[in-house]
């Protein structure tokens, strides 16, 4: 680390507040007299800082006071008018469970979880796993208007050692709130005694109930857009007269931050992650910096003496990679991410192969492949080969048949019969870059509305569309349980949105509706074919050339990555069966891009895990998953431990490889490391090695 830190010392001035930068270059870090040394200057973009302490008994940083067993149990109670503390506890509970298999048979509490130490030691006592410490939370608001209001948070465990400082980033996945990565990266960092730098990356779980004007503060408590003003987590940018007209024509509607901020937040996910690190450095110096004679805190903890690992999964993983690419100031030492959602600026000449054969397609953008999946999945799910798909029955067969027929009529697929059309839809997905390994996942991904929700959210985000546009006829609303039409909810979903929402409808009682010719209704019921007209419209925003398509594609071009990690050591772990973020469009080509960009200086390892997919929580929640799929989380933890050993003990990084797991099989008996989960090895066998040569990424069969 000496050489790396010396390099970072020379780079850091351009990226940090002046006080921190001066210390990184040799300024005094102790014994400051009044005005003699650098002060701990709060970053200029930080506003509304709150600091709370947690004793590790009644409440804590990792489990909200629930302990490992409480996280596996029933949701914690909240009052009729929830307090910030109640909302926080419920938010931690829901976000923790959203990213892991929380069943004992799946490994929770035995192989991973708050009660499992980093060396694998298990503490099965009730309430184990709580971590005492402090939590700093604030808005990053660069222009002071409240239009951006990215939430950043620094968790500082009581075990933090200022003599050996470390920070782990935990940028939220999906469109989740600031606690979104508490189990994905936060837990590992806290167990290491590291501070954790969280952010919701400006796409967090912010909602605006348009009819009432109710919005949330950063802690989830409620106010009106008028009363909170710039303190609102998110308020739709709509003129009062236009909002009144929209509400009259479209009652019971909601705006969401990711979809409707009109800022294309993804373009700033890397910067937001770097800002979270800067905020955490400031918070650490508020705790441990020397106090001068004037009572002002100085700077002790700097990028030059702090180990920083950028970590996260899915969108959070993509944000970590973006941060590393943008890190001209040397804030980040290393990167460890799982199944990153990334959009690539593909270089000429790159090719991806599996088993020596070119893959069908690679390097498509999220919007491209998600809108195609949204169009084809409800039809492809009924291909005869997919008859055993988990959750298939949740897609009404008649509606699926009508979708297939509508796609055939539109010339998207061919076939005269339902079976022929479904086979054609499945073949089209494979031709577009999905591996056959993910065939059985198309049904559940569409039925749980993961695919449609993502397609509509990103269409709005990349287009910078106002909520009043009802882009492609879609909007977000509370709906009747009997008719599926927009209707008032028995209780406003805003009260628990912070605690239970994930930022992408359907969430927290707000659903995706289509304003079809017959009237607005749940998208799954629209036009008898699950709103094919709207799905075709979303697709045309990518394939078309009109002004709307041009606008959306310009938004996508703002978010593409280059593959240049600036020589930082990095590990990407990805499941071969991932149907939401397919490897052919993300990790595999990114590996090649990195090799082309960095050449011999590249320190990126890619770990491809068989029988692993995107949603570990589905292993517990969706029948049929536990038999077939192993927990990716197990390998994310391994990769973090291996990176730590590399940074601290100069252990070699594992070479790029395929890890061949063994599913649990019929009845899903308790998962076993020896039987099901082979380790990531330092040097894989030749048949498992992922290679790059002459512009070609080659993944073994």
Image (cartoon, rainbow, N blue to C red):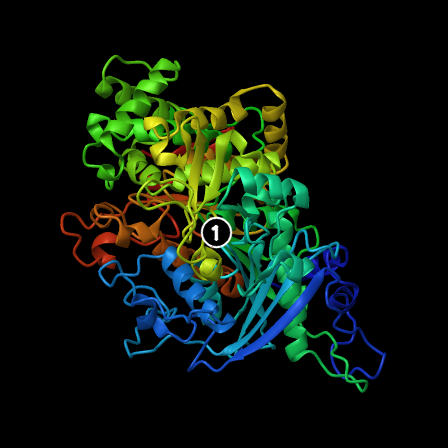
Q: Name the residue at 29% across, 68% down.
A: 73
Badge 1: residue crowd in 10 Å (few <14, some 14–19, many ≥20): many
In the image, residue 265 sits, relative to residue 377, either above or below, namely below
Residue 393 percent across, percent down from the top left: 22, 38
- Which residue position holds label 1? 173
62 relative position to 672: left or right: right
Q: Nearer the viewer, residue 10 or 676?
A: 676
Q: Name the residue at 34% across, 68% down.
A: 71
Write down the quadrant of residue 197 in the picture: bottom right
Q: Nearer the viewer, residue 51 or 572?
A: 51
Q: Name the residue at 51% across, 23% down.
A: 540
The residue sitting at the left extreme is 666
The residue sitting at the right extreme is 35
Q: Quadrant of the C terminus?
A: top left
Q: Nearer the viewer, residue 422 or 146?
A: 146
Residue 506 percent across, percent down from the top left: 41, 46
In the image, residue 157 sits, relative to residue 175, either above or below, namely below
Write down the quadrant of residue 483 in the picture: top left
């Amino acid at each position: 680390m000496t050489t790396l830190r010396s390099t970072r010392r020379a780079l850091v001035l351009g990226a940090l507040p002046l006080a921190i930068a001066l210390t990184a270059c040799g300024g005094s870090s102790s014994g400051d007299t009044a005005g003699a040394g650098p002060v701990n200057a709060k970053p200029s973009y930080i506003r509304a800082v709150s600091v709370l302490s947690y004793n590790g008994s009644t409440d804590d940083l990792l489990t909200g006071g629930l302990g490992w067993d409480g996280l596996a149990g029933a949701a914690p109670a909240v009052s009729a008018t929830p307090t910030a503390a109640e909302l926080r506890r419920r938010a931690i509970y829901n976000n923790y469970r959203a990213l892991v298999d929380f069943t004992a048979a799946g490994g929770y509490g035995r192989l991973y979880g708050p009660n499992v130490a980093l060396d694998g030691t298990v503490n099965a006592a009730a309430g184990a796993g709580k971590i005492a410490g402090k939590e700093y939370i604030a808005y990053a608001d660069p222009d002071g208007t409240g239009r951006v209001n990215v939430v950043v948070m620094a968790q500082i465990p009581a075990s933090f050692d200022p003599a050996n400082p470390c920070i782990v980033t935990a940028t939220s996945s999906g469109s989740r709130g600031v606690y979104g990565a508490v189990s994905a990266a936060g837990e590992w960092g806290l167990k290491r005694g590291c501070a954790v730098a969280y952010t919701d990356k400006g796409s967090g779980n912010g909602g605006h109930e348009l009819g009432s004007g109710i919005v949330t503060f950063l802690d989830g408590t409620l106010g009106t857009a008028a009363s909170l003003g710039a303190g609102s987590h998110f308020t739709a940018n709509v003129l009062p007269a236009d909002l009144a007209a929209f509400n009259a024509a479209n009652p019971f509607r909601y705006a969401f931050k990711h979809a409707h901020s009109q800022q294309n937040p993804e373009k700033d996910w890397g910067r937001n992650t770097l800002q979270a690190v800067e905020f955490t450095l400031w918070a650490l110096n508020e705790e441990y910096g020397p106090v001068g004679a004037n009572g002002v805190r100085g700077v002790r903890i700097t990028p030059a003496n702090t180990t920083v690992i950028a970590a996260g999964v899915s969108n959070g993983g993509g944000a970590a990679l973006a941060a590393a690419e943008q890190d001209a100031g040397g804030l980040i030492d290393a990167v460890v991410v799982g199944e990153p959602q990334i959009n690539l600026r593909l270089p000429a000449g790159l090719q991806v192969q599996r088993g020596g054969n070119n893959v069908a397609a690679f390097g498509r953008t999220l919007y491209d492949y998600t809108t195609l999946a949204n169009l084809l999945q409800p039809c492809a799910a009924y291909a005869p080969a997919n008859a055993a798909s988990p959750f298939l029955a949740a897609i009404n067969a008649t509606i699926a048949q009508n979708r297939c027929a509508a796609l055939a009529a539109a010339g998207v697929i061919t076939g005269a019969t339902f079976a022929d059309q479904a086979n054609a839809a499945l073949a089209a997905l494979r031709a577009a870059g999905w591996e056959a390994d993910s065939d059985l996942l198309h049904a559940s991904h569409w039925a749980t509305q993961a695919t449609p929700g993502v397609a509509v959210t990103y269409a709005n985000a990349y287009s910078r569309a106002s909520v009043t546009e009802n882009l492609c006829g879609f909007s977000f609303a509370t709906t009747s349980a009997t008719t599926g039409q927009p209707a008032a909810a028995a209780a406003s979903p805003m009260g628990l949105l912070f605690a239970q929402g994930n930022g992408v409808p359907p969430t927290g009682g707000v659903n995706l509706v289509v304003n079809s010719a017959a009237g607005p209704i749940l998208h799954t019921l629209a036009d008898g074919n699950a709103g094919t007209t709207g799905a075709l419209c979303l697709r045309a925003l990518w394939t078309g050339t009109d002004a709307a398509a041009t606008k959306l594609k310009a938004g996508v071009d703002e978010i593409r990555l280059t593959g240049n990690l600036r020589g930082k050591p990095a590990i990407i772990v990805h499941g071969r069966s991932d149907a939401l973020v397919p490897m052919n469009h993300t990790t595999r080509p990114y590996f090649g891009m990195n090799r082309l960009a960095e050449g011999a200086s590249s320190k990126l390892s890619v770990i491809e895990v068989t029988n692993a997919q995107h949603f570990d929580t589905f292993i517990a929640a969706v029948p049929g998953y536990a038999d077939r799929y192993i927990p990716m989380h197990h390998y994310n933890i391994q990769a973090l431990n291996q990176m730590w050993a590399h940074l601290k003990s100069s252990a070699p990084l594992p070479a790029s490889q395929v890890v061949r797991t063994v599913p649990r099989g019929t009845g899903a008996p308790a998962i076993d490391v020896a039987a099901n989960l082979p380790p990531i090895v330092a040097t894989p066998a030749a048949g498992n090695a992922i290679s790059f040569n002459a512009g070609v990424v080659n993944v073994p069969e």
